[in-house]
Each structure stands twice: as structure tokens, then as C-alpha cells.
Image (cartoon, rainbow, N blue to C red):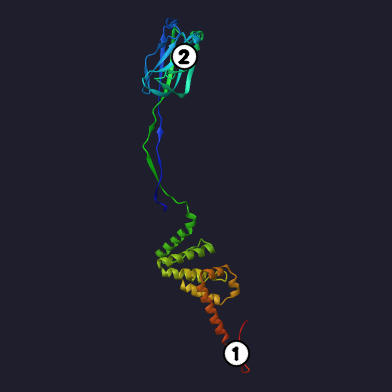
């Protein structure tokens, strides 16, 4: 898929579980009158609602059963019929001196309440909430007992609609690779605007300046800006050397720079071929532009033949002037 195209990234949905919180305070006035109800007998609060479910508090002043008749028992009860609900809760007795919860039983993690199951209809499961003697010493004030209950009900999870996320492919940063091209385009626009190359590349060193000229030649060749192309060829022709002439010739052939190509071949025929052949540019020229190399060989052969035909007469004999 090409950069910038749309593609389906992923689908997503969300499950959200919200909670309903509330507090109920159950006051038992006339505690002394409730004592002696008997084991297993209880006092129940009014029904209250939290999270859409009905609840109540049961208080057993003489204990839940015979094994715990020395204790009081306190329970939270789910009153809604045919219901299942997960809830965290706490049950505390208000201290008569500080008026804050003293003894407290709490369930930090959600517990499953089921109205159809007596073992899960109530919480907690521990019937020995507090010794009756301790209750009457610290938690009875004016013959009144206060029980505080906090409930957090986990509501049914809500699923959001499935949504599709799309992403536009963004290629990795390649500004360094195209920085020179951007500079060349700037130089090209400047030439189009002014018709001159004056001041172009003044801030560049030798190699970067030559690279800029070659990029301008490529752009001029592409957009048929002949005058710019000739100006660039002129600049390069003035800076030929044994080290760069082969490379310059190869690039001149690649970008259809006939004038520069002619100058390079002329330069080569006048230089020491042994020095030229040892350059890296010559190896590249030989591999990439064999037809250009053939032109050079033809030119040098012609010059050699021309030189060999210049005979000097000495005592009626001809001799071949040669440097070999």
C-alpha cells in the first residue's frame, strides 16, 4: 500500500462497569428491650435501595445460633427476589464516645449475592460479630445502638458500539535524503526567476557545490531548460582534472550533456592515460558507459595515427616521430 493511503488499522470496543454507592444508618432505639429476644431472633431495618436492588440489615442481639450466643450478629441481606448482584460492603458499629465507626467488618472485593441461595443471600459469613459485653460497654449510648452500612454495587457491564479506527500511513522521516534535492529545487526556482546563477552555492564547499550543479543539470535536462544546462556544463568544464574527468564524462553521458562530454573526451586525449586508468571514475566509466569509452579509444587512435604520419626526412630517409 502506497504512503498516504487509508488502511483499516483495527476495530475496538469498550466494556465499562460503573458502580452505585450509598450508605444506610440503622438506629436501634431501646436496645435493652431487644435483648433477650432469643437465639436466632433478629431485628431488621427498613428496606433501602442501592444500585436498583433492595437491601436490609439484620441484627441478632442474642446471636445467630447456640454456638455464638455470647455474641451479637450483624448481616447485610439482599431483599430483591430472583436477583444476583456483586457488591462490596462494610458494616460498622458507631462508638458512643467518638461517634465514629469503631468495630467494622468490610468486604473490599465484590461478593456475589444471590436471593435464591441462603448461603449467598447474606454477608458476612462470620456470625461472631462482637462479644455482647464489649458491645454494651462501648457502643450503647442512651440505650441506643447505631449500625452503619456502606454498599458499592457493581452494575451490569456496558459495551460500547464497535468502532473502526483508520490510519493514514505516514512514511518514516526521509528529510536528510531529500535535503539536497530541496536545495536544488530552490536553486532552480531562483534561476527561473532571475535567469542567473550568480551567488548560487556560495555557502557550499567544493564537493557539495559540484553535487548541486549536477542536480541542476538533471533538473534542467528534465524540464528542458537548455540555457541553465549549458551554464552548468560550462562551470564543470572549467574544473576538470585527471581525478574527476572520468566521473564527469559518465554523468555527462547520462544527462545528455553533449558539450561537456566533448570537452571531457578532448581532455582525456591530452592527458596521461596511465594516470587516468588508475582512477576509480575510470572503472565506473568502463562498466557503465562502454560506448563512451569506445569514443575515447577512437579519438586517441586517430590522434596517434595523425601523429605517426608526420614523418621527418633525414638524408633521404623517413623516420617516425614517436614518444615511445
Percent position of residue 237, x then y = 51, 71
Q: Quadrant of the C terminus?
A: bottom right
Image vertical order of residue 322 relative to residue 31, above or below: below
In this view, the residue in front, 13 or 295, is: 13
Q: Quadrant of residue 89?
A: top left
Image vertical order of residue 139 relative to residue 89, above or below: above
Q: Nearer the viewer, mark 1 or mark 2?
A: 2
Image vertical order of residue 176 relative to residue 240, above or below: above
Q: Secondary structure at mark 1?
A: strand
In this view, the residue in front, 160 or 306, is: 160
Tell which residue pokes out farthest to the bottom in this image: 316
Residue on which the image places disc 2: 93
Residue 312: mark in rendering: 1
Tell which residue pokes out farthest to the front in this image: 117
Q: Secondary structure at mark 2?
A: strand
Image vertical order of residue 2 relative to residue 246, above or below: above
Percent position of residue 206, x then y = 54, 64
The answer to whether residue 199 shows anywhere in this view is no
Q: Quadrant of residue 78?
A: top left
In this view, the residue in front, 50 or 42, is: 42
Percent position of residue 272, x then y = 59, 75
Amino acid at each position: 500500500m502506497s504512503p498516504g493511503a487509508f488502511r483499516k488499522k483495527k476495530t475496538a470496543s469498550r466494556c465499562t462497569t460503573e458502580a452505585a454507592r450509598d450508605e444506610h444508618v440503622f438506629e436501634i432505639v431501646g436496645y435493652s428491650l431487644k435483648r433477650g429476644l432469643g437465639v436466632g431472633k433478629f431485628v431488621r431495618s427498613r428496606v433501602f435501595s442501592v444500585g436498583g436492588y433492595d437491601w436490609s440489615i439484620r441484627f441478632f442481639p442474642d446471636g445467630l445460633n447456640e454456638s455464638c450466643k455470647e455474641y451479637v450478629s450483624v448481616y447485610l441481606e439482599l431483599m430483591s427476589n430472583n436477583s444476583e448482584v456483586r457488591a462490596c460492603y462494610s458494616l460498622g458499629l458507631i462508638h458512643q464516645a467518638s461517634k465514629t465507626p469503631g468495630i467494622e467488618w468490610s468486604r473490599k472485593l465484590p461478593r456475589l449475592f444471590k436471593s435464591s441461595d441462603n448461603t449467598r443471600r447474606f454477608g458476612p459469613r462470620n456470625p461472631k460479630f462482637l462479644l455482647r459485653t464489649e458491645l454494651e460497654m462501648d457502643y450503647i449510648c442512651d440505650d441506643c445502638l447505631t449500625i452503619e452500612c456502606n454498599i458499592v454495587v457493581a452494575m451490569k457491564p456496558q459495551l460500547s458500539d464497535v468502532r473502526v479506527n483508520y490510519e493514514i500511513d505516514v512514511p518514516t522521516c526521509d528529510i536528510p535524503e531529500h535535503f539536497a534535492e530541496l536545495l536544488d529545487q530552490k536553486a532552480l526556482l531562483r534561476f527561473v526567476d532571475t535567469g542567473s546563477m550568480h551567488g548560487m552555492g556560495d555557502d557550499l564547499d567544493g564537493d557539495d557545490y559540484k553535487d548541486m550543479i549536477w542536480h541542476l543539470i538533471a533538473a534542467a535536462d528534465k524540464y528542458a531548460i537548455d540555457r541553465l544546462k549549458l551554464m552548468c556544463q560550462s562551470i564543470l568544464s572549467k574544473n576538470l582534472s585527471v581525478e574527476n574527468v572520468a566521473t564527469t564524462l559518465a554523468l555527462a553521458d547520462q544527462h545528455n550533456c553533449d558539450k561537456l562530454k566533448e570537452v571531457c573526451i578532448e581532455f582525456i586525449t591530452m592527458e596521461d592515460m596511465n594516470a587516468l586508468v588508475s582512477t576509480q571514475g575510470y572503472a565506473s566509466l568502463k562498466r557503465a558507459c562502454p560506448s563512451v569509452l569506445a569514443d575515447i579509444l577512437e579519438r586517441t587512435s586517430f590522434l596517434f595515427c595523425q601523429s605517426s604520419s608526420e614523418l621527418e626526412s633525414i638524408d633521404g630517409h623517413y623516420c617516425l616521430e614517436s614518444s615511445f
